[in-house]
Each structure stands twice: as structure tokens, then as C-alpha cells.
Image: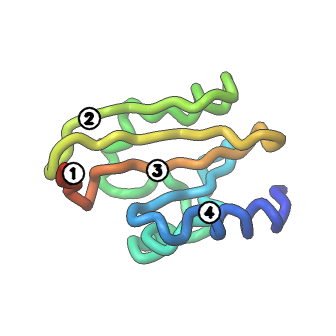
Amino acid sequence: MIDQDVIEAFHLMWDNFPESVMLLNKEREIIASNKAGQDLGRIPGMKCSSIQPLASHQGCKANEALRTHEYTYRKRKGNLGDVVSFWLPIDGYPDYLIHFSVGGPIKYEYTI
């Protein structure tokens, strides 16, 4: 079981991030999600692997991040352009990780 302090820290750091971010355990159960994730129905107790479309889980790097305790990522083409997905281990909690993607539902434009 993860400490409540870690869940609170997750929300403090990620709740205002514009795209979905999830705190997952090694079984891919969502422990917490930020506001954007909750708006998409990504709620605690749900398996992240059940999020549609299921084909988006091909190439999942969660096992790699859990095994190596180093971040990993995957870049793919999405409907609005490139999507980069990240899996971040949590120091001191080897059975948990942070997972998010950038560029899925939001098209980011270059700014100067």
C-alpha cells in the first residue's frame, strides 16, 4: 500500500497539468489521477489497461520502468500530431509509477 502522503503529493504536483496523469501500481491499477484524468473517467481502482482505445496500449513501457527504475517513453503519431507517453518510477516506491502522455487530446502550437 502506498502512503497517503504520496497520493497527496501526486495531486499537489499534477492536478493542474492539462493532460491526464495517473499514479499506478505494478498491477496497472489506478491509485490516483489528476483533474484531467478524472474528467476522462480515469478513477482509482480502474485498470489503466482498460482505457479505450485498447490498441493505444501496444508498446506499453510500464514493465520496463518498473524493472529498471528509470523513466522511459514512447513516441507515436496521434490524430492531432505526435504523442509522447512517459512512465516515471517513484523513488522509494518500486511497485508504483507515474504515467502520462503529452499531445493526445491537445494540439500544442509553437510559441515564441
Disc 3 crowd rating (10 Å Cα; few below 14, some 14-19, many 20+) is some
Evaluate if marks 1 and 3 touch, with contact meaning CB atoms under 8 Å apart: no
Which one is earlier in the sequence, the residue at label 1 or at label 3?
3
Tell me which amino acid carries mark 3. Phe
Q: Does label 2 or label 1 sit earlier along the sequence?
A: 2
Q: In the image, is residue 102 above or below residue 74?
A: below
Q: Residues within 10 Å of mark 4 (few under 14, many from 20)?
A: few
* Residue 33, horizontal then vertical, whole percent: 56, 66
- The reply to whether discs 4 and 1 touch (Cβ–Cβ < 8 Å) is no
Residue depicted at x 20% and y 45% = 78
State left or right for residue 16 relative to residue 83: right
Q: Nearer the viewer, residue 67 or 35?
A: 35
Q: Which residue position holds label 3?
A: 100
Mark pair 1, 3: CA separation: 25 Å
Query: Which residue is pictured at 28% across the width and 43% down the height?
Result: 83
In which image quadrant can residue 81 be found? top left
Residue with the mark numbered 2: 76
Element carrying mark 2: strand
Judged by depth in the image, the label closer to the viewer, 4 or 3, is: 4
Query: Mark 4: which secondary structure?
Result: helix
Mark 4 = which residue? 13
Residue 25 at x, y percent in the picture: 68, 49
Q: Amino acid at mark 2?
A: Arg
